[in-house]
Amino acid sequence: MPNAYKTERFARRWKSFSFMEQVGHIGIEVARARHWDERNRVHYRDSSLECVLQLVDLTLRFESKPGRLYEMGIFRNVIQDILDGTRQYGCSLESLERFCMPFAIIARTRETAEAA
């Protein structure tokens, strides 16, 4: 689990991202966890999921909109559920990745448009 996510410097950088960028970055880490899960590398998958939890916690720390807080709270619970192995929510890493990736695409599109 990278310690970089725990630093205040990283937290300030994370806060500067839009919500869409944050969820997009979270999605990339979810994709990494899915990659390791498909290869039965549980340790690496769990490490990636721990990173997801840290990023979600940072998002929750800086978010103020109730709807987003609610959604990210549920998202966090689902990730924790997968990490614990209980799978009571019945979600897969693939479905969570599909949830996150449109945010990454929108954030990248906006970033590209602003740079032009």
Image (tube, rainbow, N blue to C red):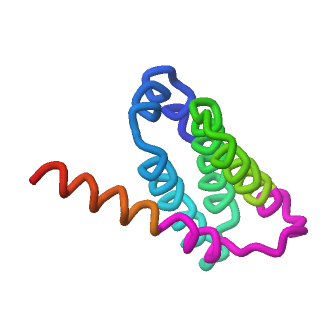
Magenta span includes 100: yes
Residue found 68% across the figure and 57% down from its top: 46
Image quadrant containing the N terminus = top right
Query: Residue 82, located in which quarter of the rendered image?
Result: bottom right
Residue found 63% across the figure and 30% down from its top: 61
Measured as percent of width and height from the top left, residue 6 is found at 57, 28
In the image, the segment drawn in magenta is: 81-101
Q: Is residue 4 above or below residue 48?
A: above
Looking at the image, the residue that sits furthest to the top is: 8
Residue found 85% across the figure and 69% down from its top: 89
Measured as percent of width and height from the top left, residue 16 is found at 39, 32
Q: Is residue 108 above or below residue 73?
A: below
Measured as percent of width and height from the top left, residue 21 is found at 42, 50
Q: Nearer the viewer, residue 100 or 47?
A: 100
Secondary structure mostly taken by the magenta-highlighted segment of the chain:
helix
Q: Is residue 3 left or right of residue 95?
A: left
Measured as percent of width and height from the top left, residue 98 is found at 55, 74
Q: Is residue 39 above or below residue 18?
A: below
Image quadrant containing the C terminus = bottom left
Residue found 67% across the figure and 75% down from its top: 40
Query: Residue 79, located in which quarter of the rendered image?
Result: bottom right
So how many labels did they put on this image?
0
Q: Nearer the viewer, residue 12 or 116?
A: 116
Magenta span includes 115: no
Looking at the image, the residue that sits furthest to the front is: 66
Q: Is residue 92 left or right of residue 65?
A: right
